């Protein structure tokens, strides 16, 4: 007897035998339609059924269909064309869903963006996707307008969060929060309100609906290892993915009745397709949570709306379990039948604790943005396997191949690279054909993740290929170590990564966050691990930070945790590592435990080491943070973006991420320019400002000639030779001859030679951008100390005097026998001056 095509396609997939009863082995053939058809049919069959709930407001399917059809008419009148990209800068809200489906009905491609993007990140994303229309919440409007000229955005549509609040809440919001929290704005001429467009009556002649294979959604990857790329999904791909997930949850969730908590952001594939799309397939009302980090709001929303399904990430589940209301038994989560944890590995301990709290079930899952949520998940009723993320959903296939790519498919339980195939994989990285071809080969998506399948077809994700640690030639998967440490009753969170070691090449390091009131030593953690794993896997280094750095969707950022241990033995450094801001990793060091913080910012072509003496002296009284600008020291070298605005954005983001504001800001030369901009842009971050060898306003003609000459020299003789010639001029002979500065000079020269020619040109031109600041100096209200070297040729006293005159109350002090690098040439004098000034400010 000959197998049917269906039987042939199912052969060799052991996981199919372990599906929950009622879950189909395939959903093929899929209907040639889209989520637009799903909403339209629901509006016809169940017009009054709730599609979404938001703070007490209920939007029915009839209203959702009417509003989105009217918006499609309005967008067409605005000039939005078929295939045009419409970007959304919105939190989870009715406006976000209405704007997405309205743009789809107009034939546009939607690009949901992270509202927390910095200006630089937002500018990059808008240009990457080529958006011409942007729908933005009022609180982000000024940010959009500041960068619009640098993008292709021609239409800006504004909406306020109050528009879908119930009447009483709307009045309270207007009276108490709208102006105070920055929601009240006046759109500039040419910009329009979304609510005005929603009043447009649908025309009988609507824009032609998109075809199933038309592009629908551009979702940006996380960008933690480089600049984000936009993965393109079609309307049919989104529908297929949502149908698969709906079929998987059907044995537990009741269609139309059970509510789904939508706390995952709609700019991520998990929230947009995995939660919203799946809910629409089953007509399950979605409960919108605009900010999942507001745990009080999450708890209150669960209590009021009684959702049955809670898609989340491990960090959110862990944070909720630790919340005082939950720990104190004041939060009721008993309505939850099912929680799914995605986007990051779910540690077994977190799973067990949340299941005990809810009485429901928590399952793990796995997918990628590039797969358009083609998912692997644990069964919702059948017995899960500890440590497994589950099995492929209907029509999703998984293979494991050797990491080296030379041994083909691997047998069960042997780790290798995870390959995924499904009908809904992304079509491409937007207009990046070479990168697309590298990722998807012969229909298989090469995930870059390491894992294995067991005999039953359950997938176990070991780690990322790039994260494997190799101590002494062995291979250690960080997640395995994290699982062991997380099982300790005193541990709240843990991150594990490899760090360089002169003897072994690399060793395992663990960053362990303890539960409140608990205490552990590194020996305690290591002993716990020795009892449970091979000796080469036991962390050689253990630290106890207060928190772990995470991405917007809750992934622990191992690249940020990974720190170079150079100088740790003599520096007394409490924390060091890299933080990803604006597309680059900035290296920082932190020491001291004073109540107030000093942030040190170095000069052009130098690095944080120029403040070694100052940090050593002041850390007894202050918390001291020094960092390397992009392209300097141990921070990442970018191909562009070294101008003052970029460096200021980087610094602002770094201070926010480290939680060290408001701070005393010490800036040398270029770092001083950044300090001035920071004090003007975000005065709430700067407690006082200390400027070393800084001039706020240039002599235009001389500086233009000087820096253009340097740029030409960089192009002509090369950066390494230029560095040798510039050092004596800018940094003085003391810096060059002091034997204690050997390491600093070598590191300075290394990082200078690492900057690209384009980068050095941007850096030199960026210094010129301080021109014109003199007129703004009167707006600086924070206390300011200006230190000038008596023999400084790069920033002489003649440049500092106008700056002192422009800043009200600024103190000017000249340091004898010092040049541009006064921190190196006269360290004790600088320390004394800084300490006296800070004492006067504190007094």
Image (cartoon, rainbow, N blue to C red):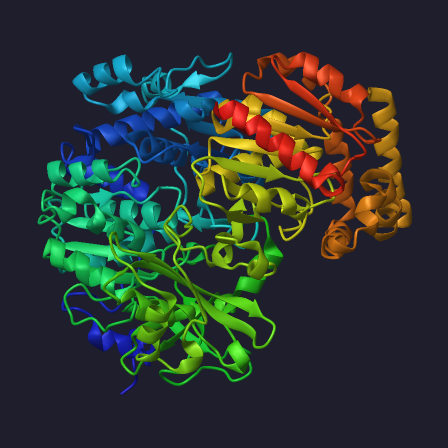
Residue at left offset 53%, top offset 36%: 598
Q: Is residue 9 in view?
A: no
Which of the 4 image quadrants contains residue 522?
bottom left
Measured along the vertical axis of the image, is residue 826 above or below residue 449? above
Going by the image, does 458 lie left or right of 537? Answer: left
- Residue 435 lies, with reference to residue 600, above or below; the image says below
In this view, the residue in front, 323 or 427, is 323
User: Residue 308: percent from the left, percent from the top?
Assistant: 14, 48
Image spot of residue 587 (x, y percent)? 58, 50
Query: Hey, which residue is sitting farthest bottom in the picture?
Result: 1
Q: Is residue 748 visible?
A: yes
Residue 298 in the image: state x and y as whole percent. Answer: 22, 40
At a point 30% along the width and 85% down the height, the residue shown is: 2
Above/below status of 590 relative to 116: below
**Position of residue 641 measured from the top left corner of the image (x, y, whole percent):** 66, 39
Question: Viewer-proximal residue, 727 or 480?
Answer: 727
Name the quarter where the N terminus is drawn: bottom left
Q: Is residue 256 left or right of residue 123?
A: left
Nearest the viewer among 459 and 29 is 459
Q: Is residue 234 above or below residue 56?
A: below
Query: How many discs appear?
Result: 0
């Amino acid at each position: 007897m000959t197998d049917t095509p269906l039987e042939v396609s199912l052969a060799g997939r052991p996981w199919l035998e372990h599906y929950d009863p009622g879950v189909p082995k395939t959903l093929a053939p899929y209907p040639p339609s889209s989520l637009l058809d799903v909403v339209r049919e629901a509006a016809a069959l169940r017009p009054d059924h709730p599609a979404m709930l938001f703070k007490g407001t209920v939007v029915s399917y009839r209203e959702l269909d009417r509003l989105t059809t009217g918006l499609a008419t309005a967008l067409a009148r605005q000039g939005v064309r078929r295939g045009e990209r419409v970007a959304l800068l919105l939190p989870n809200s009715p406006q976000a869903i209405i704007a997405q489906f309205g743009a789809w009905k107009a034939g546009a491609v939607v690009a949901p963006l992270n509202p927390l993007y910095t200006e630089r990140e937002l500018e990059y994303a808008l240009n990457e996707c080529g958006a011409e229309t942007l729908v933005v919440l009022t609180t982000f409007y000024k940010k959009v307008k500041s960068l619009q000229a640098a993008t292709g955005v021609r239409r800006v549509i504004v909406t306020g969060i109050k528009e879908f609040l119930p009447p009483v809440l709307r009045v309270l919001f207007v009276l108490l929060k709208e102006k105070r929290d920055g929601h009240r704005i006046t759109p500039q001429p040419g910009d329009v309100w979304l609510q005005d467009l929603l009043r447009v009556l649908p025309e009988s002649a609507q824009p032609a609906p998109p075809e199933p294979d038309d592009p629908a959604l551009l979702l940006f990857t996380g960008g933690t290892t480089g600049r984000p790329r936009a993965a393109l999904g079609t309307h049919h791909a989104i529908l297929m993915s949502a149908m698969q997930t709906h079929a998987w949850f059907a044995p537990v969730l009741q269609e139309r009745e059970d509510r789904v908590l939508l706390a995952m952001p709609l700019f991520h594939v998990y929230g947009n397709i995995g939660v919203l799309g799946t809910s629409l397939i089953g007509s399950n009302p979605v409960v919108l949570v605009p900010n999942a980090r507001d745990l009080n709001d999450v708890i209150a929303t669960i209590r009021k709306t009684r959702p049955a399904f809670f898609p989340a990430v491990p960090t959110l589940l862990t944070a909720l379990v630790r919340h005082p209301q939950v720990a104190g038994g004041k939060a009721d989560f008993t309505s939850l039948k099912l929680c799914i944890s995605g986007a990051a590995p779910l540690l077994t301990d977190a799973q067990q604790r949340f299941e005990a709290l809810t009485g429901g079930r928590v399952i793990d899952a796995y997918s990628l943005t590039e797969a358009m949520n083609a998912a692997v998940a644990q069964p919702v009723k059948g017995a899960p396997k500890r440590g497994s993320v589950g099995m492929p959903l209907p029509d999703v296939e998984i293979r494991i191949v050797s990491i080296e790519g030379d041994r083909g498919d691997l047998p069960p339980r042997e780790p290798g690279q995870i390959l995924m195939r499904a009908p809904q994989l992304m079509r491409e990285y937007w207009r990046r054909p070479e990168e697309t071809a590298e990722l998807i080969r012969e229909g298989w998506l090469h995930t870059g993740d390491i894992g294995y399948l067991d005999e039953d077809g359950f997938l176990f994700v070991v780690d990322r290929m790039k994260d494997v640690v190799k101590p002494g030639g062995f291979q250690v998967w960080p997640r395995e170590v994290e699982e062991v440490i997380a099982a300790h009753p005193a541990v709240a969170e843990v991150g594990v990564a490899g760090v360089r070691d002169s003897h072994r090449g690399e060793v395992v390091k663990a960053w362990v966050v303890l539960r409140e009131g608990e205490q552990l030593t590194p020996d305690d953690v290591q002993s716990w691990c020795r009892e449970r794993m091979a000796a080469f896997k036991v962390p050689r280094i253990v630290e106890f930070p207060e928190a772990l750095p995470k991405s917007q969707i809750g992934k622990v950022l191992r690249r940020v945790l990974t720190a170079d241990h150079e100088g740790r033995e003599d520096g007394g450094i409490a924390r060091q590592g890299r933080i990803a801001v604006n597309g680059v990793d900035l290296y920082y060091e932190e020491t001291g435990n004073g109540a107030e913080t000093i942030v040190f910012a170095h000069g052009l072509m130098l690095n944080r080491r120029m403040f070694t003496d100052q940090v050593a002296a002041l850390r007894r009284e202050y918390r001291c943070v020094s960092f390397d600008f992009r392209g300097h020291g141990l921070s990442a070298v970018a191909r562009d973006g070294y101008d003052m605005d970029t460096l200021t954005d980087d610094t602002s983001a770094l201070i926010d991420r480290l939680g060290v504001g408001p701070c005393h800001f010490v800036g040398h030369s270029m770092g001083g320019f950044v300090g001035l901009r920071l004090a003007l842009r975000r005065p709430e971050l700067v407690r006082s400002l200390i400027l070393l060898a800084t001039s706020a306003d240039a002599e235009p003609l001389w500086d233009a000639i000087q820096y253009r000459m340097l740029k030409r020299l960089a192009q002509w003789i090369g950066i390494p030779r230029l560095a040798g010639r510039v050092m004596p001029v800018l940094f003085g002979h003391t810096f060059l001859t002091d034997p204690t500065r050997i390491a600093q000079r070598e590191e300075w020269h290394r990082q200078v030679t690492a900057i690209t020619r384009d980068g050095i040109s941007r850096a030199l031109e960026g210094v010129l951008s301080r021109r014109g600041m003199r007129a703004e100096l009167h707006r600086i209200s924070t206390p300011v100390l200006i230190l000038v070297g008596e023999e400084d040729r790069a920033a002489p006293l003649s440049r500092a005097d106008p700056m002192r005159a422009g800043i009200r109350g600024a103190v000017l002090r000249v340091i004898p026998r010092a040049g541009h690098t006064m921190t190196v040439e006269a360290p004790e004098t600088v320390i004394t001056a800084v300490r006296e000034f800070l004492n006067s400010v504190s007094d």
